[in-house]
Structures are given as structure tokens and as C-alpha cells.
Image: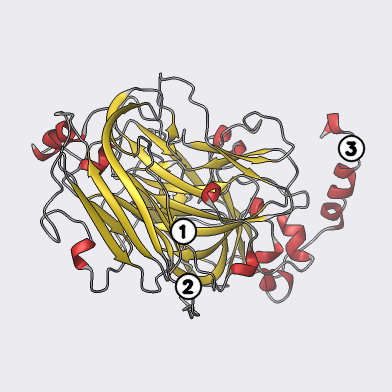
């Protein structure tokens, strides 16, 4: 996965809560050790009610949560006391229930219990919980909180919002957290996980072929997916093959809907996105390649092998037939059936005039474009080439930033760090930015900049079109498949 930084902003809006009948919502969390194998490697863990991720908490904004935590931990390889933080809940007048050990409470000792009493006081949204005693949640004590607003301003935009549409993205370590923490505190870099998981299932290099998590949908329905990063270290880039995503909530706050092809989600963050199951009945990849802060030194980890399956009712009980492919910002570029230039000449001007898989971004004439290219974490050096321009290499592979006299070229190699390039959009046209490893280009590692579409159609910078060029498409389209 390679990404570049986008610059859209989501405008917050506020929901007005009408009177909803208040209720006491009770949960019991038995915190105990158990052996699990989310990625096929069996290890002891710290679990809520025997599962990872832990029990899903569901409520409405008028409710009061009562969560009784029974500490049954015994394994000496991991912390045996515990405390739980309810991440995202504001805890008005209940700071004592927030959970961070030695900040708002002493830990719950083994063999003891504590009931967290949390009035939600009108707060809605997607949140999560995790141990807040040292690094204990790395060992498995983490789960999701969903507070559904009956007056959700986006309620008309989706049909389904339930336990089956909650998606957790989590990194996983094969060794207990205290030992890993000791190595880190001795002066080493942050520990790299062994795998990434979606809803508690993942794979590592050389491990078992663990069955992928499956999210079931029915063609014609719209789904609210609540995506939560419950990791200890890793970010992810989330996307769904062949489907756009409409963001409606970020970290518990409703937002003006924003359509994207994918999004980065870092530790602790939550997004609600609407997915329209309007595609052909088959299986599609849910992709969440991991983003690390430095190169991996863990031979178990394949940062790109983090997948689940979006399964349409009626599709085969199998993984998608589409191979895992490269992509920019969660979008795998696919060539359109009509050349981008011909679309522009015919009037295409706005981003909405192009399909998601065409991954075409519109640039204004003469604006300065700065692109942050974030490399993949698997050792590949991607030689990125921009058509139509030479660009300034302001930063290469997380090196020093140079805006004074940067080198200028049209190919830059990006490995695991970040590179920054700049150019002036003074050459109207649809210009390709792509990895020049041809296999990666064919796999979708590309984006098109539609530079100054209006200026390309008319004025001093208008495109010169030959009849011979116009004849190319009808001739090509008339070919039999074996000649294309």
C-alpha cells in the first residue's frame, strides 16, 4: 500500500437529541486468561468473556451503563491486575469511572470486582474500550462501544447498523506484552507486531491460512460500517474493492457526508462509513494494509496481507477472485473504457465526472501542487513518475526538507518513508502519476491528475485534436477481444 496525503476537511454538525426513554444497560466482563490464535499462532491472552475482540457494548444516548468487571487473571507472564478505559466517553461528573490506572483509579486486583457506572448523558457515536494498566491491552483486552442515536441526522442514508457491521482493525503480537515492553524500554524502537487483524482474524508469513472475516451484505441495501482501530501501534488504510465509502462520523462526532475511496485510520480512531451494496453479486476484498512508523524488522509481518471479504448474498462461499493489488489511498487504479482526455474534451470537469476506480483528481490552473508520498513498509522502492511535468523533490524518503534549491526530475524513488514533491499546474491535461515498476502499475498503483480541464478545452492552452486521434477509439472498440 502506498498513499499520498489528501486535504479534504469534514465539517462537524451537531445532532439535537429528543427525549428517549432512559434505561440501565448491564454488562458483565469476566477478565480471564485464555489461549487464542487470531492469526493461527496460539498464545495466552487477556480476554473479555473469552473472546478477542471483547464483548460488544451497545446502548443509546439516554442510557446508563453498568459494567461489572470480574478480575480472574492468573497468568504470571502478563499483568494480573486490571483497569478499563472507555475511550471516547466524556464521563461528565463521573471521572472516577474513566479507567486509567493511577490517574482516576487504582487497578482492580486479581480475585476482585468493580462495577463501572457510566451515564451517557446524551452522548452517541462509535467508541471503544481497552485496558489502561501499563501495556495490558496489547494482550487482548480491547473491544467496541456503539451508542446508537435514534435521532441520527444520517439515519435515512443507511438500512443496516448492527453488530455485524462493526469492523475492528487491530495489530497482534505473538509474545506477551510485559516482555516486549521490557525490550522497548531498554532503548529499542517500538515493537513491530506479528500480524494485522480484521475482527480478530489475520495471517502472518509462514503461518496457517486463517479464514478471513466475512461481512455479509444484500444487494440493494446500504450499510453503516463502524470501523475502529483497536491497535497498540499500527495504522491502517481502509478500503473496499469496487465500492466508495461515505464518511458520516469521526470519533463519535457526526459530520457532513463525504465520499472517499478509502481513508487512513490511526490507533484509537473511529469512522462510520456508508457502503452501498450496489455492485454485482460476488465477493469483494475489504483491504486494510498496515502503516508503520519505521521499517519492519519482524519477519512474521506482511503489512499488506490484512484482508476481509465483503460477501454479497448469493455469491460463492469463497474468497474474491481478484488478486490483492497495489493502490493509492485505498484506490486501485483501473483504466476507464473511455480515455480520460476524451472525457475532458467532452465536458468532464469535476471529480464526480470520473468513477472511483479511475482515481482522477482535478487540479486548478497554475496552482502549486504538493504531494506527500508515503511508501510501503515491505521493502519495495517505488520509482514514481509524473507525466507532463518535472517536479521538485522537496523531501526524499523522510530525509531533510529542502524548499530552497531542491533537485528537479520526473522520477523519484520512495521506499518505506515519506517523499514530498511539488509542481506548478501550468500544463493543462490528464497527467499520470504511477509507479514505474510495470507490475505495480498493472496492479493499480497510479492516479490521474486532470489539470485545468476548462483551459484544456478552450483558450490559449486548448488541446489540439487531430481527426486521426479521434478515429483511434472507434477502430479499437470494434476489434474482437483477442486483438485488444
Q: CA distance from mark 2 to mark 1?
A: 27 Å
Assess disc 1: are there few (<14), some (14-19) or many (≥20) residues with their C-alpha within 10 Å of its C-alpha: many
Assess disc 3: are there few (<14), some (14-19) or many (≥20) residues with their C-alpha within 10 Å of its C-alpha: few
Locate the C terminus and report the quarter of the image it occupies. Answer: top right
The answer to whether residue 396 shows anywhere in this view is no
Secondary structure of the residue carrying tag 1 is strand
Q: Position of residue 440 (x, y in %)?
A: 55, 36
Please report the residue visible at 48 percent of the width from the left and 78 percent of the height from the top: 17
Assess disc 2: are there few (<14), some (14-19) or many (≥20) residues with their C-alpha within 10 Å of its C-alpha: few
Q: Position of residue 455 (x, y in %)?
A: 67, 73
Please report the residue visible at 42 percent of the width from the left and 49 percent of the height from the top: 56
In depth, the one of 467 and 89 nearer the eye is 89
Choose the circle earlier in sequence order: 3 or 1.
Answer: 1
- The answer to whether 176 is drawn above or below residue 113 in the figure is above
Choose the circle earlier in sequence order: 2 or 3.
Answer: 2
Residue 249 is left or right of residue 283, and the answer is left
- The answer to whether 392 is drawn above or below residue 478 in the figure is below
Question: Label for residue 479?
Answer: 3
Residue 317 is left or right of residue 101, and the answer is right
Residue at numbered disc 1? 271
Q: CA distance from mark 3 to mark 1?
A: 45 Å
Are the residues at dot 2 and dot 1 in contact (C-beta closer than 8 Å)? no
In depth, the one of 406 and 129 nearer the eye is 129
Amino acid at each position: 500500500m502506498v498513499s499520498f496525503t489528501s486535504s479534504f476537511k469534514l465539517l462537524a454538525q451537531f445532532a439535537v437529541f429528543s427525549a428517549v426513554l432512559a434505561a440501565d444497560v448491564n454488562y458483565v466482563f469476566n477478565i480471564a486468561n485464555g489461549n487464542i490464535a487470531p492469526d493461527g499462532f496460539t498464545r495466552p491472552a487477556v480476554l473479555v468473556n473469552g473472546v478477542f475482540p471483547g464483548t460488544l457494548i451497545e446502548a443509546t444516548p439516554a442510557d446508563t451503563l453498568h459494567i461489572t468487571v470480574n478480575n480472574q487473571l492468573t497468568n504470571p507472564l502478563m499483568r494480573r491486575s486490571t483497569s478499563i478505559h472507555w475511550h471516547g466517553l466524556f464521563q461528565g461528573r463521573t471521572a472516577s469511572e474513566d479507567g486509567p490506572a493511577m490517574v482516576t483509579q487504582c487497578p482492580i486486583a486479581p480475585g476482585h470486582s468493580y462495577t463501572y457506572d457510566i451515564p451517557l448523558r446524551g452522548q452517541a457515536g462509535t467508541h471503544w474500550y481497552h485496558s489502561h494498566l501499563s501495556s495490558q491491552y496489547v494482550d487482548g483486552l480491547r473491544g467496541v462501544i456503539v451508542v446508537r442515536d435514534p435521532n441520527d441526522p444520517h439515519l435515512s442514508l443507511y438500512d443496516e447498523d448492527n453488530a455485524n457491521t462493526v469492523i475492528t482493525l487491530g495489530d497482534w503480537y505473538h509474545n506477551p506484552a510485559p516482555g516486549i515492553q521490557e525490550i522497548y524500554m531498554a532503548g529499542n524502537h517500538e515493537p513491530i507486531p506479528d500480524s494485522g487483524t480484521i475482527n480478530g482474524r489475520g495471517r502472518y508469513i509462514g503461518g496457517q491460512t486463517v479464514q478471513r472475516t466475512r461481512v455479509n451484505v444484500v444487494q440493494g441495501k446500504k450499510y453503516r460500517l463502524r470501523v475502529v482501530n483497536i491497535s497498540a501501534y499500527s495504522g491502517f488504510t481502509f478500503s473496499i474493492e469496487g465500492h466508495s465509502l461515505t464518511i458520516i462520523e469521526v470519533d463519535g462526532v457526526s459530520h457532513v457526508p463525504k465520499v472517499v475511496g478509502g481513508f487512513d485510520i490511526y490507533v484509537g480512531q473511529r469512522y462510520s462509513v456508508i457502503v452501498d451494496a450496489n455492485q454485482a453479486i460476488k465477493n469483494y476484498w475489504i483491504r486494510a494494509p498496515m502503516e508503520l512508523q519505521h521499517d519492519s524488522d519482524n519477519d512474521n509481518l506482511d503489512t499488506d496481507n490484512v484482508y476481509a471479504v465483503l460477501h454479497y448474498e448469493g455469491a460463492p462461499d469463497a474468497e474474491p477472485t481478484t488478486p490483492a493489488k497495489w493502490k493509492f489511498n485505498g484506490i486501485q487504479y483501473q483504466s476507464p473504457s473511455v480515455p480520460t482526455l476524451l472525457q475532458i474534451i467532452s465536458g468532464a470537469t469535476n471529480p464526480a465526472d470520473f468513477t472511483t476506480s479511475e482515481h482522477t483528481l482535478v487540479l486548478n490552473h497554475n496552482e502549486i501542487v504538493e504531494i506527500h508520498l508515503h511508501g510501503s513498509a515491505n521493502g519495495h522502492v517505488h520509482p514514481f513518475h509524473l507525466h507532463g511535468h518535472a517536479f521538485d523533490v522537496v523531501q526524499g524518503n523522510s530525509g531533510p526538507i529542502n524548499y530552497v534549491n531542491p533537485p528537479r526530475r520526473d522520477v523519484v524513488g520512495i521506499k518505506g518513508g515519506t517523499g514530498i514533491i511539488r509542481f506548478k499546474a501550468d500544463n493543462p491535461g490528464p497527467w499520470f502519476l504511477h509507479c514505474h515498476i510495470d507490475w505495480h502499475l498493472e496492479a493499480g498503483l497510479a492516479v490521474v491528475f486532470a489539470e485545468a480541464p476548462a483551459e484544456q478545452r478552450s483558450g490559449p492552452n486548448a488541446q489540439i485534436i487531430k481527426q486521426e486521434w479521434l478515429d483511434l477509439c472507434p477502430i479499437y472498440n470494434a476489434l474482437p477481444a483477442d486483438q485488444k
